[in-house]
Amino acid sequence: MFSQYELKIQMLFNGNYVFSHYLPLSYLPVWILITTPIIVLLLFFIGYTFLVKRSFVRIINIKEDAVYKDFWRSKKEKKDFFIIFNFTLIFFYIILSNTVLYTGWRHLYFLHIFIIYIGCFAIYLIDLKIKKKIITFFILAIFISINFYQIFKFHPYQNSYFNIMILDSKKKDFEIDYWGLAGAKFINEILSIEKENKLIKIGVASFIPLERSLKILKKDKIKRVEIVGQDYKSADYIFNNNMSEVNKNKNKKYNIPTNFKKINEFAINGFIIYELYKKI
């Protein structure tokens, strides 16, 4: 059984706040589509379509007097069938059973193994069709290089990666840095502003335990920082990374007071990782 608090948790998804226990059917498919590299998605759809079609054709053509009357004709085909069957079963079970998920599909990253396998199968199919193997290698090398560039660009915030399918107007409609990885960078930025050796009080306008970011800082820096949560009256600065467990449109818990001014923000590829507010 879930507590009353857990039942009330909401998340920002596609511009709307949704309850974690009552997710829309599009929740999992959308998260996979916008956070998986385009080349991986393309290869997956090619491989998935072929494997589903092959399995369907095999089923409808089973006959007693047929030479081939099974779902597979080799151990490799048998493995392919179980891969596609397990992925499809898990994927649709999660969607239709109203499974509880929090902030994206991080609980289901194991599905990525199936996606990559099916994508690799698509590469095998393409390689069979193209006579000049160098063409296949060249195309794949380009897309892989793009992916490596994206990893370098987002590092160390790869968990905040989104592909080009998400429009610029939608980049504020999803929760980005759930783990609060940018918290340490935020604190270091404040310490670089406040060079005097005094205690700095930091408020948090997000559902993020900023205290854990202190653990990776040096002791002399930790002594200069005090996290005061939503006690904005005593705060000198406020951290906001757009994470919330409540509907910000209705609940004023994380409203930033008017006596604070945004002085900076950290963004990658148009996605705001955090905002920095200072008391004026």
Image (cartoon, helix red, strand yellow):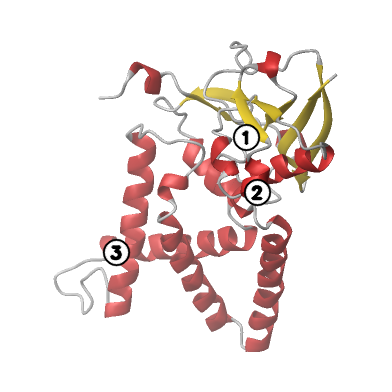
Say which amino acid is labelled 2: Phe
For label 3, the crowd category at 10 Å Cα-Cα, with few meaning under 14, some 14 to 19 and many 20 or more, is few
First of labels 3, 2 by sequence position? 3
First of labels 3, 1 by sequence position? 3
Residue to which mark 3 is pinned? 82
First of labels 1, 2 by sequence position? 2
Q: Position of residue 269 (x, y in %)?
A: 77, 48
Q: Are marks 1 and 2 in contact (CB under 8 Å)?
A: yes
Q: Position of residue 44 (x, y in %)?
A: 51, 61
Q: Which mark is residue 106?
A: none
| Residue appearing at x 36%, y 52% in the figure | 88
Q: Is 259 located above or below residue 43 in the figure?
A: above
Which marked residue is nearer to the observer: mark 3 or mark 1?
1
Say which amino acid is labelled 3: Phe
For label 1, the crowd category at 10 Å Cα-Cα, with few meaning under 14, some 14 to 19 and many 20 or more, is many
Give the total of numbered labels. 3
